[in-house]
Amino acid sequence: MTSLDSMSERRGHRHGLKMALALNAGFMVIEGVGGFLTGSIALLSDAVHMLTDVGAISLALFASTLAQRPKNPRRTYGYLRAEIIGAMLNAVLLILLCGFILLEAYQRVGQPHTIEGSWVLGIATIGLIVNLASASIIHRFRQGNLNMEGAYLHMLLDALGSVGAMVAGGVILLTGWMPIDTLASVFIALLVLWGGWRLLMKSIDILMESTPAEIDYNQITQAMLSQEHLVEMHDLHIWAISSGVLALSAHIQVTDDCVENGHWPDCLKETQNLLRTRWGIEYTTLQTEPISFKGDSDQPAG
């Protein structure tokens, strides 16, 4: 992906986030006003819950906007990592929210609260429509972007929560069995907790500059060493600057004849083209050395 493609894609991310933010903020205000007018604590509580979604989407939007700032001598890659920090904060927020739900469910075991099934069913139905619309908007942009995935998981949490609440509300209306509300909450919280944990681990991997999961380190090593005149390689590092923005650095050793004949620039260009076309690695730093060169290095990559 070229830098222009990346900028265009991120503009799409911001547009999608703005649409989702407008939907959720609008529903939150309507729900809050309705709660005050009707005196419904259920409506007010759900409005507060929607506030966490507005905060999560706002965080993702801020991170995506910050990532567009140009690079400078202090931040030579720009602010691309802002998206990863935003994704990590969203993951932590998801985990904390799930922990709160599980704690509340534990406290209700044996002491189910009286719940108005009709209110629960009505609120959950409207909430599901809003959350599905928001999730559908964000889903188009979430592939390969952890920041968008974090916002999407928040929408998924609410959508699953709405489905669970609809089921719980229906069961309560039909049978009056209150514990179904607690059971639905636990099931949903565990599902989203798993997604939040995966998002957190992916974010930490990028911040730790681990080799991206979609990249086969050994495969790249073999492909580079198969290039003509390239006989040895060391100090190979592959990492992600942000979601979908890959970087690689290595010391490559070519034959002495290649250096003497001035062919080494062609070897360098061919290797860069290989990395760009086959794995989408745009940022490559390759130090070319003659085979006779002996210097400090890590263990050879090949």
Image (spheres, helix red, strand yellow):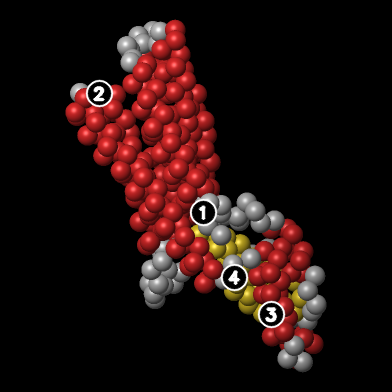
The residues tagged by marks 3 and 4 sit, at their Cα atoms, a distance apart of: 14 Å
Residues tagged 1 and 4 counted as in contact (Cβ below 8 A): no
- Give the residue number, with chain letter if any, for mark 4: 282
Residue where numbered disc 1 is placed: 141
In this view, the residue in front, 173 or 94, is 173
Circle nearer the viewer, 3 or 2? 2
Q: How many marks?
A: 4
Whether residue 4 is situated above or below residue 48 in the rendered picture: below
Give the Cα distance between marks 3 and 2: 67 Å
- The amino acid sitting under disc 1 is Phe
Residue 98: x and y, percent? 42, 31
The residue labelled by disc 2 is 41
Disc on the earlier residue, 1 or 4: 1
Picture quarter with the C terminus: bottom right
Residue at x 37% of width, y 25% of height: 122
Task: Using the image as rendered, state which of residue 46 and residue 93 is in the foreground.
Answer: 46
In the figure, residue 101 lies in which quadrant?
top left
Pointer 3 residue: 268
The answer to whether residue 98 shows anywhere in this view is no
Q: Earlier in the sequence, mark 3 or mark 2?
A: 2
Name the element at disc 1: loop
Alpha-carbon span between mark 1 and mark 4: 21 Å
Amino acid residing under circle 2: Ile
Answer whether labels 3 and 2 touch (C-beta < 8 Å): no
